[in-house]
Image (spheres, grey):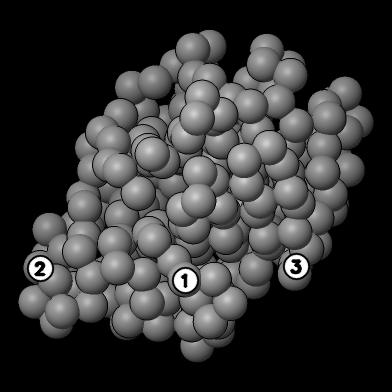
Amino acid sequence: MTTLTFLGQSAILLEAGGFHVLVDPFLGDNPKATTSPDDVPADLILLTHGHGDHLGDTVAIAKRTGAPVVAIVEVANELAEEGLDVVDLNLGGTHEFDGGWVRMVPAWHTGLTPKGTPHTPAGLVINLGGKTVYHLGDTALFSDLALPSRRDPLDLALIPIGGHYTMDRHDAVEAARLVAAPHVVPVHFDTFPPIETDAEAFKREVEEAGVAKVSVLAPDASVEV
């Protein structure tokens, strides 16, 4: 069984067979997060990009747990300078690990780390415990969101809905159609005033259109993938 726990903003924890994959661990400075970066487990850390609300507590968590960090090459190189064990993927690259794999796919966004490293943001197609999850990262709506499911049937997709910095909830309905996952979890909303939105309205529109089941999760709530 593969379990997904929403930690707030775009941070999630995937667990299967005792292996923990942590994505975009923005926790300590996240006003909505209830999990401490001092407590969250991680055997592998994945980053969609290096903005502060995604890079978050990566360095501290990786140093505490010893977890390798998979990131786009420029961000990975920056993190290697911090002494972290990194995997420097680029778009289209796949990293295999015990119990699964992750592939880096395009996202339409901008990228600059808090230290000033420019980079290309990404989405992540993650397979763990035989289940495949597509984390779209921070992205606008674009047609290539349909491509990952043509290679790997998806079990769940994480779609940003907050607007302002990513697609809004209206574009996210069309994104859910393109992505073609049977189960959708909205992310990147309500953490700060610019990205406040009506997640229940998104859920209603997607489900009434017969596109997918939608689970709107509070921080630390979990679903089975």
Q: Which quarter of the picture shows residue 63?
A: top right
Q: Which quarter of the picture shows residue 76?
A: top right
Disc 1 packing (10 Å; few <14; some 14–19; many ≥20): some
Nearer to us in this view, 60 or 144: 144
Q: CA distance from mark 2 to mark 3?
A: 33 Å
Nearer to us in this view, 2 or 113: 2
* Residue pointed to by mark 1: 153
| Residues at marks 3 and 1 touching, judged by CB atoms closer than 8 Å | no
Q: CA distance from mark 1 to mark 2?
A: 24 Å
Please name the amino acid that badge 1 sits on.
Pro
Disc 3 packing (10 Å; few <14; some 14–19; many ≥20): some
Locate the N terminus and report the quarter of the image it occupies: top left
* Residue pointed to by mark 2: 204
Write the residue at 33% across / 22% down. 34
Write the residue at 75% across / 69% down. 92
Q: Which quarter of the picture shows residue 208?
A: bottom left
* Residue pointed to by mark 3: 91
